[in-house]
Amino acid sequence: RRVGIAQAMLNDPKILILDEPTAGLDPKERVRFRNLISDLSKNRIVILSTHIVSDIETVANRIIMLKSHRLLCNDTPYNVCKTLQGKVYETWDIESISQPYFILTKRQEEGRTLVRFVCETECPEAEPVTPNLEDLFLYVYRDEVV
């Protein structure tokens, strides 16, 4: 991957387009590569196409999301995440939630299941949490197989 980047950099391009640049790398190499991408972005535009949300959170200062050939957003990570503000919750007791919801993730901890979900209406039975890019990605693309 580094050789590919080195080849792409030979003519000092002002725009660098990378498609899934960290796919298949181990965690340590993924971090090193993200740092390289961050350094390269100081004096050029880097367009990163990826489904690896942690790469986006680490590197991107602007996020463009497309769905069904439509532009959904073009904004900073902070502002993009704010679109779910007040709609993301966690609970240990998902069965007690009476409102319609969409499950984002489940985590096992000490024999219990912590469920993170989106609820379009206020959900007093659960704890509100700060939305992140993974929440947004899972919610926006919920109807698609990814």
Image (cartoon, rainbow, N blue to C red):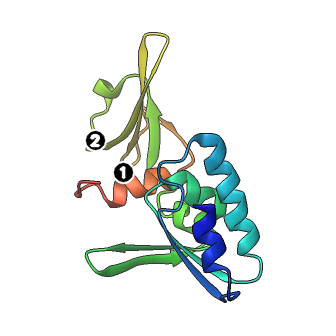
Q: Where residue 12 sits: x, y (%)?
A: 71, 87
Q: Which mark is residue 60?
A: none
Q: What amino acid is labelled 2 in the image?
A: Gln
Q: Residue at x 54, y 47 (%)?
A: 25
Classify 10 Å Cα crowding around label 1: few (below 14), some (14-19), many (20 and above): few
Q: Where residue 131 sits: x, y (%)?
A: 53, 51
Q: What amino acid is labelled 1 in the image?
A: Thr
Q: Residue at x 32, y 81 (%)?
A: 70
Task: Tell me how far mark 2 sits from mark 1, CA to CA.
Answer: 7 Å
Residue 86 at least partly seen: no
Tell me the SS state at disc 1.
loop
List the residue tagged with mark 2: 99
Apparent side of residue 129 relative to residue 41 in the rendered image (left or right):
left
From this view, report whether residue 111 is shown above or below residue 44: above
Classify 10 Å Cα crowding around label 2: few (below 14), some (14-19), many (20 and above): few
Q: Where residue 57 sits: x, y (%)?
A: 60, 57
Q: Residue at x 54, y 42 (%)?
A: 129
Looking at this view, is 52 or 65 the one in front?
A: 52
Looking at this view, is 83 or 146 the one in front?
A: 146
Apparent side of residue 59 relative to residue 89 in the rendered image (left or right):
right
List the residue tagged with mark 1: 121
Identify the image quadrant of residue 93.
Answer: top left
